Amino acid sequence: MKAEGTLSDKIILAIDDTSIDRIRRLIAATSPFITTYKIGSIAFTALGPGLIQEVRASGKDVFLDLKYLDIPHTVSKAVRQAVSLGVKMITLHTLGGREMMERSVEASDNRAMLLGVTLLTSMDAEQAGAVGLRGDVHEIVGRLAALALGAGLHGLVASGQEGPRLRKEFGSGPVLVVPGVRPSEYGTGSDDQKRVVTPQQAFASGADYIVIGRPVTESSDPARTLAEINEGLR
Ligand code: C5P
């Protein structure tokens, strides 16, 4: 289940919007550069499974990023539903624990890639400590990653800053998805993201896929921004 092929397969665009018209325009504009669109809680709450069906019908893959965290029964049934909608990638929050993840792996029947979210890229050590997670960011991410991979998940979502350590500890097997990506020329800072990396750094740190949202979706010319990102990666 590893990433292979062209850059367009490896750059996932986060659709965090509520308007189906804007989303349709975004997909039309970015389609030559993108194979997989990430649908998270903003777009899913606004537009529901119909959006997944529409993206699939346009020939694209869907990364359903709802970061499931609930009792094992609930999450495994939700995963089964997501699989039946034909999504390619699904996130679970590793804080949901081992049984929740194991039952989800079983429910997915190997028909989708299950990814564990370790620590949100918007959180630093201080914020992690405030919710009771002990240690520095690397220790927290390492512990949660071990739990997720031990439960049979296919991979992890983690900041590029954790990439090298994760690769060192867990090898090249797990799929590594890196959000919190900001091209160096992105002028307006990192938004609410704290542990950001550039696309080049993300891939150099071991990412199989990068997730990018606002630097593209809020650009006046999303296609050009993606073309520039691609250019910078060649
Ligand atoms: O706009 P931006 O590039 O910050 O979007 C990043 C996307 O990746 C958002 O949809 C966010 O929910 C998601 N994400 C993240 N950090 C994680 C997991 C997912 O930023 N650890």
Image (cartoon, helix red, strand yellow):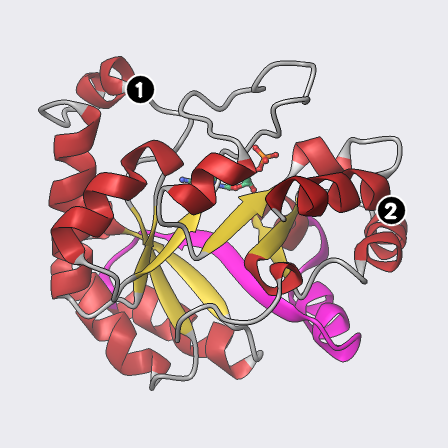
For residue 76, above or below residue 139: below
> Quarter-wise, where is residue 42 in the image?
top right
Does residue 168 show up? yes
44 or 135, nearer to the observer: 135
- Name the one closer to the observer, 154 or 164: 164
> Is residue 176 magenta-colored?
no
Identify residue type, mark 1: Asp
Q: Which residue in the protein does label 1 denote?
A: 124
Marks 1 and 2 sit apart, C-alpha to C-alpha, by 32 Å
Rendered position, 56 above or below 133 = below
Which image quadrant: the N terminus? Answer: bottom left
Residue 103 found in image quarter: bottom left
Q: Is residue 137 left or right of residue 189?
A: left
Magenta-drawn stretch contains 47: yes
Q: Can residue 18 be seen in this view?
A: no
Q: In this view, does 197 lie above or below 166?
A: above
At a point 35% along the width and 42% down the height, the residue shown is: 158
Foreground mark, 1 or 2, reads: 1
**Residue 130 image offset from top left, x and y in percent:** 21, 16
The numbered disc on residue 196 is none
Please give the range of residues in magenta.
46-72
Q: What element carries label 2?
A: helix
The residue sitting at 24% across, 50% down in the picture is 94
In-image side of 59 versus 85 (left or right): right
Query: Residue under circle 2?
Result: 22
Mark 1, other Cα within 10 Å: few <14 / some 14–19 / many ≥20: some
Q: 201 or 123: which is nearer to us?
A: 201
